[in-house]
Image (spheres, rainbow, N blue to C red):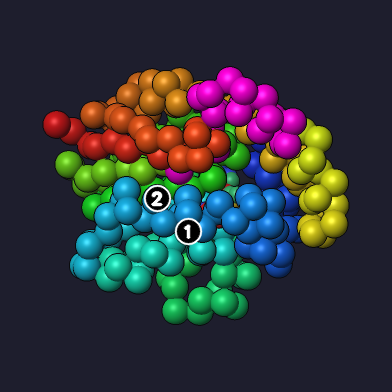
Amino acid sequence: MTRASLDKKPTDVAAMFDAVAAKYDVTNDVLSLGQARLWRRAAARAVDARPGERVLDLAAGTGTSALPFAEAGAYTVPCDFSLGMLAEGKRRLPWMPYVAGDATRLPFADGVFDAVTISFGLRNVSDVDGALRELLRVTRPRGRVVVCEFSHPTWAPFRTVYEEYLMRALPPVARRVSSSPDAYVYLAESIQEWPAQAGLARRMQDAGWTRVAWRNLTGGVVALHRGFKGA
Ligand SMILES: C[S@@+](CC[C@H](N)C(=O)[O-])C[C@H]1O[C@@H](n2cnc3c(N)ncnc32)[C@H](O)[C@@H]1O
């Protein structure tokens, strides 16, 4: 099994990420044409982690997305349900307090984090609304969330070019650089069926997040959604 299907059965999703773990970060850099680093920097600015804060990076994978918060001086917990991704992360960044956990049943008490964030993870979770509610539960009152996720380019001509890249160019490139190219077919399909910016904002509000707003990166290839717990 090298790819999950769009019903996102948790065991299939975890197994798919276990299989790509070793080459996950380098493949990302290649397939995003170097944009992944810019997106990570923008996500880190949006979270704006401060020394002494407690930050949860959910679906953290190997921990690459969690690193900027730790470097900013926050106590950062990378959490993921792929033991393969966590093991690869632990090998590279052994000092990080990796936690194995499922986004829909987080192994944390209520209200313990100042900020919670999820990068390129929410799209893969089987119960997105349940995960958004769990993130809210573990956040302290007036705490914040940042969701960094693929989205939909807003300018129609660019959207057409991008969709061609996703469906036609990405799979052959993935075959050359990834050990599990089928996982990148899933990537393309799951991006296409993911809600657009306003749709995700509505789901965050429905889950209980307030003052939800978003910002597009790379013309909407990625969107950063931010929200708060309470007024
Ligand atoms: C594309 S990777 C993103 C990793 C990292 N955040 C980054 O930006 O590189 C998606 C991650 O989501 C994790 N994931 C998917 N569903 C999950 C769930 N229900 N609970 C915890 N992790 C989940 C996968 O195991 C995988 O490591």
Would you say 208 lies left or right of 102 here? Answer: left
**Residue behind label 2 places its C-beta within 8 angstroms of ligand 1:** no
Residue 126 on image: x %, y %: 59, 34
Q: Residue furthest front?
A: 157
* Residue 110 in view in this figure: no
Does residue 189 sit above or below 184 in this rendering?
above
Between label 1 and label 2, give the one nearer the viewer. Answer: 2
Q: Where on the picture, by quarter, is residue 51? A: bottom left
**Residue behind label 1 places its C-beta within 8 angstroms of ligand 1:** yes
Which stretch appears magenta? 148-166
Is residue 69 or residue 53 the one in the foreground?
69
Would you say 190 lies left or right of 205 here? Answer: right
Would you say 118 lies left or right of 120 here? Answer: left
Does residue 62 sit above or below 208 in this rendering?
below
Amino acid under label 1? Ser
Is residue 198 or residue 135 the one in the foreground?
198
* Residue 148 in view in this figure: yes
Residue that mark 2 sits on: 43
Q: Which mark is residue 65?
A: 1
Q: Secondary structure at mark 1?
A: loop
Disc 1 and disc 2 in contact, CB within 8 angstroms: yes
Q: Residue at x 41, y 56 (%)?
A: 41
Q: Residue at x 17, y 41 (%)?
A: 142
Tally of numbered discs: 2
Residue 26 on image: x %, y %: 67, 64
Is residue 211 or residue 13 the one in the foreground?
211
Q: Residue at x 51, y 24 (%)?
A: 154
Mark 1 residue crowding within 10 angstroms, few (<14) / some (14–19) / many (20+): many
Does residue 127 sit above or below 44 in this rendering?
above
Is residue 134 or residue 4 the one in the foreground?
4
Residue 219 on image: x %, y %: 50, 34
